Amino acid sequence: MPGILIRNAFVIDPLSGVKGEVMDIAIRDGKIVEEASTDAVVIDAARCLTLPGGIDSHSHVCGTKVNFGRYMSPEDMRAGRTARKGVMHVTSGYSVPTTFGNSYRYSTMGYTTILEGAMAPLEARHTHEEFTATPHQDMLANTLFDGNWSIMEAVKEKDVKRAAAVVAWTLSAVKGFAIKLTNPGGTEAWGWGGDVNSIHDQVPHFGVTPAEIIGTMIQANELLNLPHSVHLHCNNLGVPGNYQTTLETIGLVPDLNRDRQSLYLTHVQFHSYGGSTWRDICSKSEDVARAVNNTPQVVMDMGQIMFGRTTTMTADGPMEFKLYMLHHNKWSNHDVELETGSGITPVYYGRKSLVNCVMWSIGLELALLAKNPWQCLLSTDNPNGAPFVKYPEIIALLMSRRFRENERKMIDPRTEHFVPLFAIERELDWYEIAVMTRAAQAKALGITRIGKGYLAPGAEADVAIFPLKPDEIDPSVDYQQVMAGFSRTRYTIKRGRVVARDGEVVVEGANSTIWTRANVPPAYDMSSDPEFTKKFEQYYTVRMRNYPVQDIYLPRGVRIDTEASL
Amino acid sequence: MRVILKTRPREKPRIPIEAEEIIPQNFLRKNDMKVFEGNKERTLEDLFFVTIEGPAVSPDQVEVVLTGNTGMIKRVGEYMNAGRIIIEGDIGMHCGNFMSAGEIIIRGNADAWLGREMRGGRILCEGNASHYCAAGYRGEKRGMRGGIMEVKGNAGDFTAEYLSGGDVIIHGNCGDLPGVEMRGGTLVIGGECARPCGNMTGGTCMVFGKAQRVLPTFRSNGSQDMDYAGKRYRMNLFRGDVANRGKGTLMIRA
Ligand SMILES: [Zn+2]
């Protein structure tokens, strides 16, 4: 391949300390290099905004849960239909599109890496198959441990090392990337029709609390030296007054890692509610943002909701049941043996619903009140808060107070009594947006080590060039332009190849799947642990030897090896 | 304006024709209408002898007449919003779905999915209609939302499924599960049916023939005399579907 030379790019590359300089970027053999080869294809960026490829650190695009969302929403497939064209497969769907639909839409928005927010270990094969059919992005899978029996037993025995060993075996068996805890303990309690209502409630039959599970897993994560931290969906999602639970959880987090956070809190909007019922629900974003500002060892993502229809899906089974009871819409509930569960139900977020307006405000407030953009990442928990195609609109809302004021006129007029949003003057700048959409994700996920999230020589050549000229437009006024610009790159470059251009997908794509193997001493190898193997043969519907995902499921696997400190 | 579309003889007459372009408003603007025969794109003239009589300035003045071997033509009248379509014989699946205004008259039988999710206007089928007549598409919570659907003959299973507005009148019998998931509107069944109105939450269904296997989740609400179409009937009243906290009304002739 001859390589690419991008000339006249207005580059913001936070991880390399570039805060908006016009420069050239040279690409060869899929990497950023000092100098392009003489036969390199020249792209004139014409002083357009040029960023590292976008990284979504929490999105639901692949796996059994997403696919069941597709199954149960044939009406969703009526939207977003595109015919087969050139290298593009046929696509359809809006909130739960086909895998190619997801991939192409992300690609035309400049996204080159996505972390799937929740993979049930037992069902990992399907997730990996769908990863392969999401060809324009490198994929990573958060692996669910929230209701894992062996983990809870280790927690009960206060045996952090054993918990770490179970994680190490499972991650490498299912080719997962990081530890995900979804409503820890709650999903297991749901198996008996219950839930946990605080981080100090006991999980039935196991006698452990969410606080103990979270604490143990944070320690275990660091013993294994995993690239990412524990990725937590807090307890009590969507419950009025749940900000207390969130604050208590943040209070638990020790500072154990010099390079990144020790706990990643996902979709915090859903966890920042005051009040005690749906009638008096109010924003507690100020309290939560203050706690995050004072706790540098945590990172959160917004979990912004946007108005319109979407599909909610999470491993948090009891929460989805509550949503079902609220809306009486179709609902799916699923139990995954000794591991986790899930629920799915479609929702409509309306401007006429005061509750929805408060939720909409909270997400934005979190981003505007977090002092450090490296601690608050942009997300909608796609598709729970909104399909990811709404990201450009969220960026525009964060960059323009005028846009927020215009929206204020459209929503329930009572909203302002329940939220601080309209008193906040802050408007984020290009640099902060660049941090919140790629650089901070790369750092939080710990994937800068494989060249993600920056544009210095040696990095993966994932680049997004947007039709936006930062020295000519004022985002606080021209927010429509900002929205349009972030919706459609001029060029999306993935591993040194132009993959999308002006909204058109131009190559078939071939992604890789990034997974983690923590190497543990033989004493901690669970595959030869008698108790672990016995439990497996006794309770699982599959044999232990059939459980691991074979290499053939990862045509282009990229393994990150770590040495465990056990 | 009167547009007469007479089918040309086809080598393989069982291959379906997809003809969603055949709606009155299109004949005002378009002269290059396309239809599919199987997976092959054809012009209208490839498959029909087209005769156009008289002028029209608005779609209400357009009447489209389909004659010949029309039973394999699908999606005629989809999204139609004015004018009239007359089908001299049978018609294929999905006729008149999403229509919002205007009129479709079918002299023969209609295949499945007649008038699915229609919003307004009127469909009259003088023969029988197949399954899912006046129903909703898969996954959608609201089916037919307005307008009138009248079938002189019988209708198949799942008639008026997810009905949420408008009137559906079946003079003959219905199959299994008519009015299932109904949430509004009126369904009238002149003849027999089985398991009417499962999961209904609103609306009214009247059955003038025998209703087989009425679901146990309907609460009896006495009986009353009722006038319908100039005659007086004694009707047993039911409320339900209780299993879905429903407040619908089911009336069955005593
Ligand atoms: Zn999520």
Image (cartoon, rainbow, N blue to C red):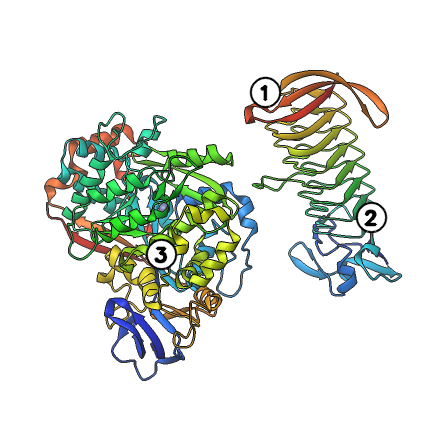
Pair 3/2: label in front: 3
**Left or right for B49, reference A24:** right
Disc 3 marks which amino acid? Leu
**Left or right for A430, reference B194:** left
Q: Which mark is residue B56?
A: none
Q: Is residue A160 above or below residue B199?
A: below
Per the image, label 3 sits on a secondary structure element best described as loop
Residue designated by label 2: B86
What chain does badge 3 belong to?
Answer: A
Which quarter of the image is occupied by the C terminus of chain A? top left
Pair 2/1: label in front: 1
Q: Is mark 3 within 8 Å of ligand 1?
A: no
Per the image, label 2 sits on a secondary structure element best described as strand
How far apart, in angstroms, are the residues tagged by discs 3 and 2? 55 Å
Q: Which mark is residue B217?
A: 1
Residue designated by label 3: A378
Residue at the image position 56 percent from the left and 41 percent from the top: B139
